[in-house]
Structures are given as structure tokens and as C-alpha cells.
Image: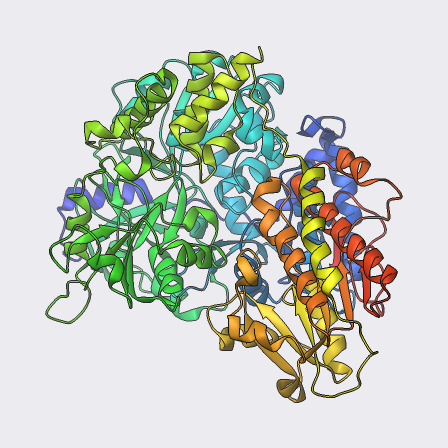
Amino acid sequence: MPELQVPESHWKQFLEWNRPLPPTKQTCIHDGIEAQATAQPTKVAVASTVTSLTYGDLNGMATQIASDLNRRGISPEMIVPLCFDKSPWMIVAMLGVLKAGGAFVALDPKAPTSRINAIMHQVNAKVIELSDTYNFMLPQTTDNQPTTRASQPNDAAYLIFTSGSTGKPKGVVVEHRSFCSGMAQHAKAQFIDRHSRVLQFASYTHDACIVEILTTLCVGGTICSPSEYERVNGLVQFINSQSVNWAVLTPSCITSIDHDEISTLETVVLAGERTLQSNISSWAASVRLLTGYGVSECSVVTTISSPADENRSASNIGMPAGGVCWIVDSKDPDKLLPIGEVGEILIEGPTVARGYLGNPEATKSAFIRPPVWLHRILQDPCHSSRLYRTGDLGRYNHDGSLDFVSRIGSQVKVLGRRIELGEIEHHIANHPSVRQCMVQVPSVGDYHNHLVAVLELHDKQCVASGDSSEINDLVPCKSGTHKIESFLRTKVPGYMIPTFWFAIGHFPRLPSAKLDRNKVAGLIAHLRLIGDASYGVIPANDAIGRQIAREVATMRLSQGQVLDPSICFEDTPLRKAGIDSIGAISLRKTVQRLWGVNIPVSCFMDQTARPTLIANHVRSAQEQGQGEYVLPEPDLKSALDGLKRSLDANITAAPARSGLSSGSDLSTLLTGGAGYLGQEILKRLLTAGQRVIVLVRACSISEGRERFQTLPWWRTDFEDLLEIWLADLSESNLGVDPKLMERLSGHVQAIIHNGARVHWTESVSDLWSVNIDATATLLQLTLSSSSVQRFVYVSGGSAIGQSVDEWLANARNGYSKTKLLAQALVEHCAICSADLQLGLGISIVKPGFIIGGPEKGVANSSDYGGILRQW
């Protein structure tokens, strides 16, 4: 045996732990699930408060979807995106894709359109499966020929997209055999079997859901699937009502649950974040408490600890399950480290994924060939196993278990999500106001475990106006970052938005001229989260408000932060105080415990939420003798009447139209042109030779134009017909440059208003500016401009022959209400302009099923909560 840089006893121990490798299971995921359906067809596979599906139901529905997918050309190695809210139908869709031979990838319907488009472009999907709620988001599809080849164990099964440092998400491709090999080991290690009733808590885009769903079905257990509302507002009630006995949760999430409230949980796996000793102290005596560690690149689960007792270290992540682990020098994987030394965790075995989709450079960097020491240990020069570099630091203990130490580099975990800080920096840096930026997640200090953005701006006014006396000091950004944050929200999911924003005059630099990240980290670590007088002091007689502020401060202190005592008396916005979604759930429970009032989590997460506002909600419910605070509905009818009155002046002063002009210099103004329907409208206009101005929310005109130039139907002769205006429908005057607004009169002959914010959980007030104010602004422009001959408003839903009051009474969410109000506003202008014979055509278009082009027809007549559409 050649000499190694570790003691002989250590490498012999490594051989005992890591050889032989776990066997590779040459099988497909759906075969195991189908075997369960054959063995126990009447057993419940998926349970929810809405519906339950037996294994027979699930298998039958999935088979029908698979047949439809095969007819539409889906075959092995083809990727099918899935876009669903929390429901059992997502699980049906997953299995349907697998049975068809394809690989599925989950899309987050709440993610920015640009991120969804980036993923769609990477996977080159031919079919999309989605809840009919999200048809508007996706592009048209094209036909393919059916195929009959069955999937093989080495075919792709699913993809998980992680954050990428270049701003482009990375898609991890996992094969059937990789998952099945790992599942055979990790199911037993985590005590998942046919008797398990597993909570489906994780987001579909988070890799933990793969275990919750696919592992559970492969072993014959039952998936308990809460709705998004139950997941956020009633998790304890759902767990109890569905007799959930197994769950995987993040350590921060479990702190919001009192184990005494739950009687059915038997096994809890903590994963996604560093386990705290307080988690073990609180839960080890009540449940079988395990700690899990894993990465998407190695089929989710890598190690599982044994059941914890109060004496176990919180950093212990247990033994490998499905693969094996090695500890190497973090700067040189060819250097194997002895037992007990800290280094980078390498993972080897059948669970290692194929790589990153269409990204050979990133794949080569992370998925490496066997290091020199591995050849030496095995004495096998032909050994061909690949290893994955996790980017995590850990160490081996002498009993064969591992400890997790920390993360290497710029990829971090926040709330269980793996985030590439470089991706956030990439998008912030693209904003025209930003010269340079840096995003960090401090490991110590008052801003511990929160995303912190530091900006060097072109305009130094906000830095100069601060209290800082040094140009390299950090100054809190109390204003001026709103547009940057709004811009970032169009690029990345909400969990990647920094909580705190600072400005700096000039970034410190290293001798190499690179940004000195360590120095900036030191500056952040020494910043105190202090009270801000601009937020106001909570009155001494507001006992509830002050107690809520104390609870917030206590939550921060539990994270090891030292706070200025004055912050307990400042009416600081909860988001600015570091309250995230998990903190909101915990704070909601505290309010319910102290004052007996149940307040929706959305109230705590609102940007305007402060201790005094929450206290007002508590008092409001108590005064009405209610145990629950109900968000008051605004007087929408009065608001509508006010908007009508403001438009009446424009209607009265509107010039009469002389008729449609055939002048080639007149354009059509289009909003919402980047969406599925908007793209089709734009295509028809350009094909007809019409000049079109499209309002686009983008960083630059070139970026906005590129969105259309990359569409499959784009032609070079469209270049001169298309004009891009940078806009934001949520801002006054649509966020358009005033000089451009002046051009509308005399240059635009028609306005097609197709833009809207579609979000089924946001309130009327959240959606008002985009869905109502923008409509009113466009109507004012239409009425005041003599050249505009037509105004077309694109609405939704079926035609309703009811009064506005009846409409609003039947509307179930804020989106529906805002669209109804906007439609009523358009109808008012249409009636009044007709009465005055202005010669102005105002119309409302209500598309039906937006599931494909007229040449292709309806994509799928049988619906299980999802719609299939050819791309």
C-alpha cells in the first residue's frame, strides 16, 4: 500500500467505513410505485383535506397522463416542467411524467417570470404540465411524434434547479438508478415505511419534497399534503387531523411548533439548516429526532444521524446513507485528511447525480474523477467512480459519523435554501443605479443568518447624507433602494431578496484590486441593530405593542445577536427587524398564546407590519369579541365610484375622433407583451405590419428587446416595427419617462391593455396599483389623445350578467376583485364615450381557455387538476 498523508490506522478505518460501495439499484422510480399500487390498490397514497387518492387511483390517473404525454412525443431524456400550487395533483403529475419516460422539473409559480423563462429555456421542454391557474405564464408549444421506448434506470428522472453564480440557475439532473439506490438506504435510516404518514411540507422546488413524495410512495406509505394556507396558517391542526407521524423540517421551522400540541408525530428529521442544541433539548424526549444532511447533486440524502438524546452534539449529521463520504483539503481534493480534521466533504457512490444540465464546465468542476489517494487506497488504477465536491466543511468522528462545520465560499443556506450569493449580486449589479455590490450572510453579529446587501451607488448622495464620517463606512439605506429591490424581485425568488441594505462610498479592495469581502464582513459584524427614531417610539400605554416588540427582540437574541436596548421601544417594521416567514409563524403563535387572537401570517409578513399595527389588530379582535382578526375589506364600490368621477372630467373634455387613420407612422401600445397571451398578440400585430410600442419592465431597452428577439417566431424584419419603452405598471404614470408619455398623443392609434399582476394570495391593496391604477391611467391617456381610436382591455373569466356589487360579493380573492373593478371602469368609459358620440372604440376581450394556438386546439380534455399543453 503506497504511503498516504494520513496514519495507516486511519486509512484502514476509511476502507472499513467506505467499502464496499452501496449497490446500484438498476430500477426505475415508477416501477417501485406501480408495485405498491398492485400490492395495495385500496390503500390511501395521498391524503389532504380536499381529497384522498388511493394507490389505485394514483396509478390509474398517472397512467392516463403518461399515455397522453407519450402521444405528444414525450420520451426518455425529455424534460417536462410542472407548475402547481400545493395539492395532490402535483404528485399525480410527477408520477405521470415518470411513467411516460420523461423527467420532471418543478417550477415555482410565484417566482419571477424571468427566472421561469430561464429554466424553460434550459430544459427545452416540449410539453408543460400545469395548474390552469398559471396558463398565462407559459409560451406556446409545438407537436412531436409519439414514442414507445421505455425508460431505463440510467435515464433522467427529475431535475432540481439551484442558484448559479452567473445569474443563471443550475439544473441538477438525477437519474432513476441514483435515486433508487439512495432510497433503498435512506428510507430505512429515516424510519420511513408502509406505516408512515409523511408530511409534505417542502416546496416542490426544494429537494426535500423528493423524499417526502417519491420515497414515501416507493415504500408504500401515505403522503399527507396540506394546502399552502394550511402549511402556513394551520400546520399543527393539519398534522393532528391527518395523523401525521413523520416529518422533515428545518430547525428554524420546528422552533415555531410546540411539541405538546402534537400527539401523532413519531419521527422528525431536521435538515436544510444547522441544527441547534435547543432543538435537541426541546424535542429529543418527545419524538425520534434525527438530523439529516444532503445535497441535490447526490439524490437529496447523504447522511442520517441516529435518534438524538440530549447529550448528542447538534453538529453531528450521522452516518452515510446511500453513498460514502471523504474529507479532503478544501483547496486540494487530492489531499485526504485524517479522522478528526476539518475539510471539504466529498460524496462518492451510486447516488451521485449525472451533472448540471447543459453546463459542462460547472459539472467538471463539481463532479470530479477519483483523486490520486483514492486510486492508492483501492489499488485499482481502472477505478472510474465519480465524486461530488459539496462545498461544505465537515469532519469524521472516530465512530464513523460526521460533523457539519460550515459552508465554503459564496454559496450559503438561508431558511434551508441553498443560495448562490453571486446570483443575487449579478442581478443587483445590472441595475443602472448600482456601480458595484456585495451580498453576504453574516455568521456573527446582529445581522447573523440574514441576507445583507452592500451597494456602491453611482449617486453618492445617500452615503454623504448619512451619519458616516468615512467614505468606507456602511450607511443604512432607508430610501433609494425601493426600485433596486423591486427590480430584483423580477429576477429571483422572494427568499433571495436581502433583508437589510447598506450603502458604501467605495468598497475596500485587496492588493489584487479585488473587493475585500473579509473587510466588508467585518464591518457588518460590528454593526449594531439599533433603534431608529424615524420609526417612532411605541407609546408607553401600548402594552401589547411593547410586548410584541420585546418578543421580536427575544427572537433576535435567541440567534446570538446583541441588540441595543432601545430597539424594544422602537416601532420597527417587522421585516426590518429580521422577521422572516418562519419568524412570522412563531410570532403569530406567541400573539395567540398571550392574547387569544389568531392573526393571519400575511399580516406579519406585510411590508408595513410593525408592533403597533399588530397590537391594533389584537385590540380590534378583542373589542369585537372575536378570537380571530379578519382583515377588513375596503369599500370597493365607493372606490370605484371615486375612480369613475375622476375619469368623468376626462370624458367630458375628450376630443371627438374623426375615424381610423391608415397612416403608417401610428403605433399600437401594448402592455403585458412578455406573457403568453401578450406574445401572441404582439406576433399578430407585427405579422400584420403594425408598429408596436411594448411597455416592458426591464433594466435596459436592449434587455427588454432581447426577450422578444429570442422567441421562436421572431423575424429580423420585425426589428423596425417594435419599440421598447421601459415601464412599471405599479408606479405612477406607468413608470414611463415623461418625455415618452408626451409622444403618445399623435403617435398612437390604439392601446391594448393586457398587463396585470396575477397573484391569488395577495390582497386588493397589494394589487391595486398594477391592476386598477394602471388601467385608469391608460383610460385617461386614451380619452385625452385625439389620435387614439381604440382601447382594448383584456379581462378574464366568463361573462357575468350581474351588478358590480354581486360581482364583488362572488369574487374569492384580491386578483378577481381588482380585475372586476378595472373591467367596470372600462365599461363606464365605453358607455359614456358612446353616449357622447366621441367616435372612440372601447372594448373588453375575455379569452376562454388559453391552452394553445388555434392551429393545435385544446391540449387535453381530461383534467386532473392540471392541463397539458404542447410547446
| Residue at the extreme right | 801
Q: Is residue 714 above or below residue 837?
A: below
Horizontally, residue 679 falls left or right of residue 376, namely: right
Residue 332 or residue 631, whichever sits in front = 631
Q: Give how far across and how far down residue 160 sits, in percent.
A: 51, 52
Q: Position of residue 710 (x, y in %)?
A: 59, 76
Asked if residue 209 shows in the view, the reply is yes
x 35%, y 16%: residue: 543
Percent x, y of residue 678:
69, 66
Q: Is residue 27 visible?
A: no
Q: Quadrant for residue 750, please give it.
A: bottom right
Residue 273 or residue 644, whichever sits in front = 644
Q: How many marks?
A: 0
Judge left or right: residue 75 versus residue 522.
right
Q: Residue at x 61, y 75 (%)?
A: 708
Q: Nearer the viewer, residue 572 or 779?
A: 779
- Give the residue displayed 52% in from the left and 25% down from the top: 246
x and y, in percent, of residue 611 in the image: 38, 27
Q: Quarter of the image for the C terminus: give it.
A: bottom right
Instruction: Name the one closer to the observer, 248 or 27.
Output: 248
